[in-house]
Image (cartoon, rainbow, N blue to C red):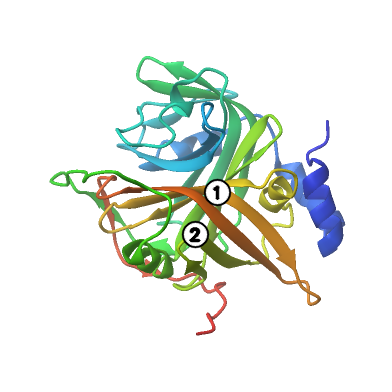
Amino acid sequence: MGVYHAGSLAVQERVGVRERAEHVGRSLGQGIKPVAAAFLELQPLLVVGAADPATGRVWASPLAGSPGFVRATGPRQMSVLREPAPGDPLATALTTPDTPVGTIAVDPRTRRRMRLNGRLRPTARGFAVTAEQVFSNCPKHIQRRESYEWAAERRPGSVRRLRQLDAEQRAFIASADTFFLATVRGTGADVSHRGGNPGFVRATSPVDLTWRDYPGNAMFLTLGNLSTDPRAGLLFLDWTKGTTLHLSGEARTEFDDDGERTVRFTLTEAVHRPAALPLRWTAPEYSPANPDIAR
């Protein structure tokens, strides 16, 4: 079985990066190397993406804990010592055996990231993932945040489930410099990182978002998934207050004559969780790779 499925191959061909993608794809493996294991154990945050087995909707959710709550416990196994919090839209998926999940750990302090996709197995204190894909990405478009602290005094607010975005949520999205994008492919799932200067993703209506797809590693795993299955889950974080905004819906990619790509997302359901994460990060230093935002 090749590294890429038909959807990713089609996008690579259309953009003209097939040869480069073939080279980059050699970095994908199933094993967790020692350097990757060491990276995981330093992280206080892990983002997980999956389809809800009951509704089929795709979501992305964050899990936070003291460093070491995520760790490699075998050559192909990652263990997570955290259960989903009340109101987490992935609560059912993260407690259902054999759920396909995608995960990503991003370290804003070093601008490094690591992705691990596989199958989930619930455990007594959380879950484990048997790895099917493990790889690192370049630091492009990751905003650097110097450090974080635990907000021990923080108490989660009331969870809201919505069909449309109100003015508060649309402003939240407009101010974002980062979001996470969960997609699915056949019997697998994936989560990727998207970053840019504030304004790079826009809510153009109460149910519509749009963003430009910046050049990346040429693999086109995310856009390849969307070309075969439009379901998508978006996660926005308030890196200071810990509020999370989860969006589930469908996305499609538009290609223009200059080779640029725009993704358009239509909302099915949103979950707004005030003060959901006990982390408070310092202000960002925007990535030098971020394009200027036309106002």
Earlier in the chain: of badge 1 and badge 2, it is 2
Q: Is residue 114 left or right of residue 255?
A: left
Q: Residue at x 81, y 56 (%)?
A: 12
The quarter of the picture where the N terminus appears is top right
Q: Residue at x 53, y 63 (%)?
A: 209
Exactly how many numbered labels are in the figure?
2
Q: What is the x, y in percent for residue 142?
A: 50, 61
Secondary structure at numbered mark 2 = loop
Compared with residue 267, is residue 44 higher up or lower down, i.e. above or below? above
Q: Amino acid at mark 2?
A: Val
Residue 229 occupies quadrant: top right
Residue 191 occupies quadrant: top right
> Front-most of 237 and 51?
51
How crowded is the residue under tag 1: few (<14 C-alpha within 10 Å), some, or many (20+)?
many
> Front-most of 55 and 118?
55
Task: Name the residue beneath numbered marker 2.
Answer: 207
> Front-most of 215 and 156?
156
Q: What is the x, y in percent for residue 228?
A: 75, 44
> Front-most of 143 and 72?
143
Q: Amino acid at mark 1?
A: Gly
Compared with residue 77, is residue 135 higher up or lower down, i.e. above or below? below
Task: Name the residue beneath numbered marker 1.
Answer: 249
Q: Residue furthest front?
A: 163
- What is the distance, in whole Å, between disc 1 and disc 2 at their CAs? 9 Å
Compared with residue 262, is residue 114 higher up or lower down, i.e. above or below? above
Q: Is residue 158 left or right of residue 103?
A: left
Q: What is the x, y in percent for residue 284?
A: 37, 67
Whether residue 36 can be seen here: yes
